[in-house]
Image (cartoon, grey):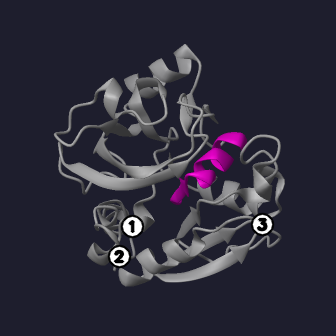
């Protein structure tokens, strides 16, 4: 199993992604944004960070990097892509996922653990997560307020493409559990084919008990178990 970890100028969670995936037996390779070849990777990861310093809108410049053509082709072939935090923002800017990430409703940068519950169990990213299981995963963002037109949100709900929602420790989705103001407490969404996931929380930073917990591994393990070449 091979994963391409895409690195843009300003990316800084690539090391965390490498750490999390290699602990699960995945071979990783960092792919610089100017490259046009993903090296035959089965999985593509767009990590968190501040690509291009988050000038203009977050991810608005990164979407034009040469590597994004390869990412788009990978996604259109039905292969898995996950964008985390800034990676989620890039996927939205590139049109690979619907909606946009705006300034947190609090207008504050939020770096804290949050609780998540899967909103569906039909995607490779969530199929291995038991219904009702609550994951404790950190966030670290200033622009994580997910917004989309009402018709788009209705379609995401109807098609069960809300991958994760913010909830309390008991798994109840409440306004108080929402750290950024995202519509519907949405923490992650899927594309129509369910092979592209964007999420604001950082599963790669919840990969080891010594680092505060390993709930994030549930997402990687679910994905790996769904692939033809499993580890």
Q: Are marks 1 and 2 in contact (CB under 8 Å)?
A: yes
SS assignment at label 3: loop
Whole-percent x and y of residue 43?
Answer: 52, 68
Magenta range: 79-94
Indicate which disc residue 230 carries. Answer: 2
Which quadrant, please, contains the C terminus? bottom left
Q: Dot 3 corresponds to which residue?
A: 9
Q: Dot 1 corresponds to which residue?
A: 227
Which of the 4 image quarters holds residue 144?
A: top right
Instruction: Evaluate whether residue 159 shows in this view.
Output: no
- Residue farthest top in this picture: 150
Whole-percent x and y of residue 97?
Answer: 60, 40
Q: Residue at x 36, y 65 (%)?
A: 206
Eyeballing the image, is 205 above or below 170? below
- Which of marks 1 and 3 precedes in the sequence? 3
Eyeballing the image, is 163 above or below 52? above
């Amino acid at each position: 199993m091979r994963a391409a970890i895409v690195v843009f100028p300003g990316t800084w969670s690539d090391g965390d992604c490498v750490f999390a995936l290699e602990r699960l037996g995945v071979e990783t390779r960092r792919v610089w944004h100017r490259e046009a070849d993903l090296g035959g990777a089965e999985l593509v990861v767009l990590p968190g960070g501040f690509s291009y310093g988050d000038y203009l809108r977050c991810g608005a410049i990164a979407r034009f990097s040469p590597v994004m053509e390869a990412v788009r082709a990978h996604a259109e072939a039905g292969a898995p892509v996950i964008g985390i935090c800034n990676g989620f923002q890039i996927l939205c800017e590139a049109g690979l996922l619907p909606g946009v990430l705006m300034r947190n409703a609090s207008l504050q940068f939020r770096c804290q653990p949050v609780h998540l519950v899967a909103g569906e169990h039909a995607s490779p990213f969530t199929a291995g997560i038991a219904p009702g299981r609550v994951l404790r995963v950190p966030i670290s963002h200033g622009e994580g307020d997910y917004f989309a037109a009402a018709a788009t949100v209705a379609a995401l709900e109807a098609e069960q493409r809300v991958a994760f929602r913010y909830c309390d420790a008991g798994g109840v989705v409440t306004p108080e559990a929402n750290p950024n103001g995202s519509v519907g407490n949405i923490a992650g969404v899927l594309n129509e084919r369910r092979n592209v996931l964007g999420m604001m929380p950082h599963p790669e930073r919840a990969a080891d008990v010594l680092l505060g917990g390993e709930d994030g591994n549930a997402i990687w393990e679910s994905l790996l178990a769904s692939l033809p070449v499993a580890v």
